[in-house]
Amino acid sequence: MAKPTVADYLLERLRAWDVTKVFAFPGDGINGILAAWGRADNEPTFIQARHEEMAAFEAVGYAKFTGKFGVCMATSGPGAIHLLNGLYDAKLDHVPVVAIVGQTSRSAMGGSYQQEVDLLSLFKDVASEYVQMVTVPEQLPGVLDRAIRVALAERAPTAIIIPSDVQELVYSAPTHAFKMVPSSLGIDWPTAVPDGDAIARAAEILNAGSKVAILAGQGARGARDELAQVAELLGAGVAKPLLGKDVLSDELPYVTGSIGLLGTRPSYELMRNCDTLLTVGSSFPYTQFLPAFDQARAVQIDIDGKYIGMRYPYELNLVGDARATLRALIPLLERKEDRSWREDIEAKVARWWETMEQEAMVEADPINPMRLFHELSTRLPGNAIVTADSGSSANWYARQLKFHDGIRGSLSGNLATMGPGVPYGIGAKFGHPDRPVIVFAGDGAMQMNGLAELITIKHYWEQWTDPRLIVAVLHNDDLNQVTWEMRAMEGAPKFTESQTLPDVDYAAFATSLGLQGINVDKPADLGPAWERALAADRPTLLDVRTDPSIPPIPPHATFEQAKDAAKAILKGDENARRVIVEGIKTKVQEFLPHSGD
């Protein structure tokens, strides 16, 4: 029997770390590893994406929705380069991903050889926490183990580079000798809690406030019950950055929803009027949506000291696990007997959800995009996973979808890159093959990445216990988010040559692959289309003709500002009249009588 190679041992070590999926695309720079995969009966499973960038996005989606680290792999040169955007997405959203890439043989390095790229320099920024090249067999376990541990410890991407000739060398373990670096498997994490004095000082600040606001980000995901208890004791409202949308249920009456440009009016007013701020597990960057600097006393809780105290002049910065820190804090908090602040928040939240329904029902040509999201919101399965692409779909994901306990959701939060929606969904599906996954993507994102990855869905969907992966395409033949940004930020009309997309029948493409494709061009057909997709025995693509003239109006915009901006900006815009009309019709819903008025 042949002795195991470095490539054989690489796969063995991944299995020992309980890696069951590797998202990848082949190439001769990793031929030695591919040959080893054949000898290993495809364990861990090689998931073949259509492009290395998609493999990286799929690893990010897998990591986001499982809590494990993701693994992606690519060949040398162009394959390694293609991974970068997905790895930057992991870096900016603090997601553990390990990238394994090939390299030309050691004998060719420095010789301007074909596909030779200085990969250590290439990955130096994106994998700044750890990037290393394996040059001898004895180096492999220590480098791989450390790449995994650093990815988990720093919640960041790491990279290891293995030259093609090294992959084929006979594996030799590190010995008990000078300048050898042995390694071991596994890691057990401590639960970090600030000391008692710091907890007492935090309680003092929070107890002194009469109008408490909580900002709960993705770092608070494991502290749902504790967050709810703190919010109840303090009579607080809770706002959520986009990456924290699934941290607390939107059915809780004091949860004000998303915050920021894509956020809600109750979240905007919560921050504008509070006198105390508690931030848990968030590094939300947009200072202008937080309280004025002289307005509120503030406490932050975060597990990572590198990212604490940097967005607001916090009076107290506590480094610790969100759940454990809140548990230590709860006994010291005094229940606020004056509930007027809480009651005002709840009234505003109730009114907001009514407004969202009314805005979704505004007549459009042909379909109001908000209604696409609203119709799903009332039908969301209890264990669904939802992903959204960057662009206008992120606006409606943020505001229109009402998440309840059990729902998971994410998007590209900080990089806000285009095109991860579908590969995120694929990664989520491999992480949770028994759960329904729903993807919202603009037609620009579908043309950039999504159409090709439908082929990946076709290739694998029959392996999933629950076959439901639904891709809803906002089909408006416009790169809509940028069109609106040009109007609002540049005071410029739509530039047709850059913004108009070629028309594609996305449902027909899905159908050609053996998936279910449904064309929707009437508002009344949205509900039945969702029901067909949610009852289907295979993945579904909803090709929904949405109106590009529906404006993503920020929560702080007044009615007069929206009307005046539309009139001033849209001179010469090909859709000027419709944009003004739809903007006014949408914004006016905030001012019409509601059920509680």
Image: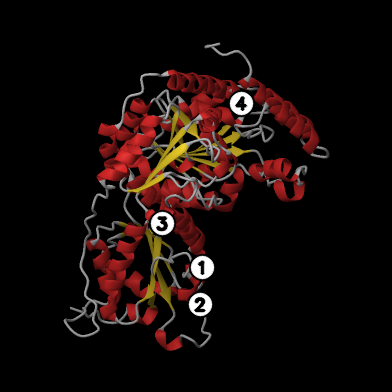
Q: Which mark is residue 117?
A: 2
Name the element at disc 1. helix
Give the alpha-carbon distance from disc 1 to disc 4, as whole Å.
Answer: 43 Å
Residue type at mark 1 is Ile
Provide the residue designation for mark 1.
81
- For the residue labelled by badge 4, is the local secondary structure a helix, a strand or a loop? loop
Q: Residues within 10 Å of mark 3 (few under 14, many from 20)?
A: few
**Residue 339 visible:** yes
What's the residue type where badge 2 is placed?
Val
Mark 3 is on which residue type?
Lys
Q: Residue at x 55, y 24 (%)?
A: 356
Between discs 1 and 2, the one toward the N terminus: 1
Amino acid type of the residue tagged 4 in the rendering: Lys
Do labels 1 and 2 touch, CB within 8 Å? yes
Q: Dot 4: within a 10 Å radius of its alpha carbon, few (fewer than 14), some, or many (20 or more) residues?
A: some
Q: Nearer the viewer, residue 118 or 35?
A: 118
Disc 2 versus disc 4: nearer the observer: 2
Mark drawn on residue 306: 3
Distance in Å between CA atoms under marks 1 and 2: 9 Å
Looking at the rendered image, the quarter that the C terminus falls into is top right
The disc, 2 or 3, on the residue closer to the chain's N-terminal end is 2
State the residue lying farthest toward the right. Answer: 572
Per the image, label 3 sits on a secondary structure element best described as helix
Residue at image coords 48%, 67%: 125
Relative to 168, does residue 281 appear above or below in the rendering?
Answer: above
Report whether 305 appears left or right of 185.
Answer: right
Q: Measuring from the top left, give residue 205's x and y in whole percent.
A: 38, 36
Question: Residue 522 — which label?
Answer: 4
Q: Nearer the viewer, residue 532 or 497?
A: 497
Count of marks, rendered view: 4
**Where is residue 472 shown, x and y percent of the image?**
52, 38
Which quadrant of the view contains residue 580? top right
